[in-house]
Image (cartoon, rainbow, N blue to C red):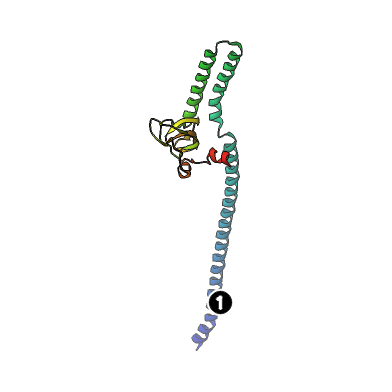
Amino acid sequence: MDDLENQSESDPQKQAASGDSQGERIEAELQAKEREYKEMYDRYLRTVADFENYKKRAAREQVEFSRFSNEKLLKELLPVLDSLDRALGHAKEARDTSTLIEGMDLIQRQFLDVLSKFGVYSLESEGKPFDPHFHQAVKQEEGESEGGEHFVVAEAQKGYRLHDRLLRPAMVVVSKRRENGSRGEESRLKGPEKSLKDDEGG
């Protein structure tokens, strides 16, 4: 009888002790989760701050690149300008125009050399078939060219490409048959830009 009474008294104590232990464990787990959450939130804030700093730095670098992206090209062009200045100075004093022509030819070659360093090359158009991807017809001339009809017989303005991309189409004179060509034939000769013949007609 006494044993049963002692056992009944000890059970609530054990249950209370067990409940206290479970509550402490839960509280410890909550505190650990709170610390983990705080650490994750701090990392998030640092990541956001780093990303904002990266965006500001990238924006500054983009501005700098836009302002100075042509610096190398311009440095290469300055000697060409120096040569032109010297040629003009000599031209004012020289009486022999052949010397002036030689100087201008030299400057032109020097300028083209600089352009080629940056992937800019002139289009070779004269004597070749008219190509609307690279040519803009400004005039048609009757007569027989060496290649035949719709061939480039002269360049009014050179075209240029940047690597494999067209930088500017060549303005060209194109051959045609002696008889009057049809309107359809003329429309074939429009290049990548509107033909100057249309401007003159409009």
Which residue is at the front of the view, 179 or 27? 179
Looking at the image, the residue that sits furthest to the bottom is 1
Residue drawn at (55%, 13%) of the image? 97
Badge 1 crowding class, 10 Å Cα cut-off, few under 14, some 14 to 19, many 20 or more, is few
Residue drawn at (52%, 86%) of the image? 5
Q: Position of residue 20 (x, y in %)?
A: 56, 72
Residue drawn at (52%, 21%) of the image? 107
Q: Is residue 168 visible?
A: no
Which residue is at the front of the view, 28 or 100? 100
**Rendered-image quadrant of the C terminus:** top right
The residue where tag 1 is placed is 16
Q: Is residue 182 visible?
A: yes
Q: Position of residue 27 (x, y in %)?
A: 57, 67
Looking at the image, the residue that sits furthest to the front is 179
Q: Is residue 11 above or below residue 190?
A: below
The disc labelled 1 sits on which kind of residue? Ala
Q: Position of residue 165 (x, y in %)?
A: 46, 38
Which residue is at the front of the view, 58 or 127? 127
Which residue is at the front of the view, 82 or 182? 182
Q: Which element type, helix, strand or loop, lies under badge 1?
A: helix
User: In the rendered image, which quarter is residue 77 located in?
Assistant: top right
Looking at the image, the residue that sits furthest to the left is 147
Q: Is residue 103 above or below residue 124?
A: above
Q: Position of residue 93 (x, y in %)?
A: 60, 11
- Count numbered badges in the picture: 1
